[in-house]
Amino acid sequence: MKTSIIILTHNQLEYTKKCIGSIRKYTKTDYEIIVVDNASSDDTVSYLQHQDDIKVIFNHKNLGFAKGNNQGYEIATGNTIVFLNNDVVVTSGWLELMLETLYSSESIGMVGPVTNNISGLQMIPVSYNQITLQGLQEFVSDYQKNSIGNIRKSLRLVGFCLACKRSVLNEIGLFDETFGIGNYEDDDLCLRALERGYELYIVQNAFIHHYGSVTFREGNVDYTKLMNTNQIKLQKKWGFSVNYFMFSRPEVVNLVPNGVKRVLEIGCGMGAMALELKERYKCKVVGVEIDTKVAEFAKYNLDKVYSDDIEVFEVSELGRFDCIICADVLEHLRDPWTVVQELSNLLEKEGYMIISIPNASNIEVIKSLIQGDFTYKDAGILDKTHLRFFTRKTLPTLFPTEMELKEVHSIPSSYNDSEKVFVEFLGRLGKKFQLDTEMIEVDALTYQFLLKAQKK
């Protein structure tokens, strides 16, 4: 079985040399290297012309990440395709470990390694020097001893290193070239695999060093603008905010008590949090998701998914639960008090309900109100889809008498120095006029509250 490793280059010869050198040194299975050069102006072209063991495609202009990788795929002969950035250094066992997981089940479509520098679940803390790479191999050796056999199901794999079955790519298609230079075409590819019912896994004992965004930094690319543009493209293509639904909420998961056997998640999205719950607590997870498009993805990751509006859904048919999660849900409801009451009836004795909800006494809202403004926005605390608003003092009103509020955690918002000074001034001013502003310095800088309540 052969693996085709496809690498794009656009200048940055020294990084390319390190990458290819590490592949030659640490890859023990049958492979071929295919390099697609996107109009390099340094010595990259000359270097590639003298590499007898590399297939090369030379482009006269930068055709972008998606197009370049698709070109490489067209001349690939391997059963497995690995899309690999040129700003990486692979380590011992990197490919063999990924292949072992990739072909362990017909349902697995793509896998990726862990790394030191990336967004999402594939990033892990490291102890080696990330500039000189001193101690890299020693770190990998020690790390692999503690993570052998560990894999983690995910909704997202980043394209810095993405191993795919050729048969899966033939079925779902290649990278969408409308994303141009780069960003979000890997998310789109993952979504198409998930849509067909394929599973994605992070191979946690396969490690690759990633310098990160080298080509973008050196190419004078407006990275933020590119990200925003392609994020909008992705949302329009799929009909929902992929960024919002692809990621879990670890701060919520951390509040779930050990020993839970059955969890209900209202607003389960694509199942990102459910995957983490099942991984950590080995529990069953049932979900309710109002967006039918999103729920179609969730059904592959939860034990049962209902696509419905929780305010009209007959919750009694859901069964009994040790824990119920309502993360960023209640503020969208007409009558969250009744929903919480009905959900509490599903809890086992001493069961828990965990809620995250925006804080209406945040500095963003205070500043608007002082200026006579309460304009709804596309996102944030004043999101136009928010119908109900709560502060620290009104949070307890959400719960029926049989529920006891045990914990209230503050998730801080971003703020500048002048806003902090302003909040401190409001606290002093309030006290001068006998107002209860004891908590304003904390609450005004809190974006969201996390609540944990227990059934008596």
Image (tube, rainbow, N blue to C red):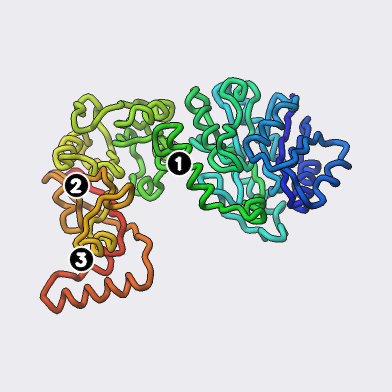
Residue at 88%, 37% (x, y): give it. Answer: 52
Relative to 84, does residue 301 appear above or below in the rendering? above
Look at mark 1 in the image and give the residue it sits on: 232
Look at mark 3 in the image and give the residue it sits on: 370
Query: Mark 1 or mark 3: which comes first in sequence?
Result: 1
Relative to 119, does residue 411 appear above or below in the rendering? below
How many discs mark residues in the rendered view? Answer: 3
Secondary structure at numbered mark 2:
loop
Q: Give coordinates of residue 432: x percent, y percent.
A: 14, 79
Mark 2 against mark 1, which lies toward the viewer?
1
Q: Is residue 352 visible?
A: no
Measure how far apart labels 2 and 3 are at the Cα level.
20 Å
Relative to 56, does residue 430 appear above or below in the rendering? below
Mark 3 packing: few (<14 Cα in 10 Å), some, or many (20+)?
A: few
Query: Mark 2 or mark 3: which comes first in sequence?
Result: 3
Mark 1 packing: few (<14 Cα in 10 Å), some, or many (20+)?
A: some
Measure how far apart labels 1 and 3 are at the Cα level.
33 Å
Secondary structure at numbered mark 1:
helix
Query: Mark 2 or mark 1: which comes first in sequence?
Result: 1
- Of residue 29 and residue 58, the one placed in the foreground of this image is 58
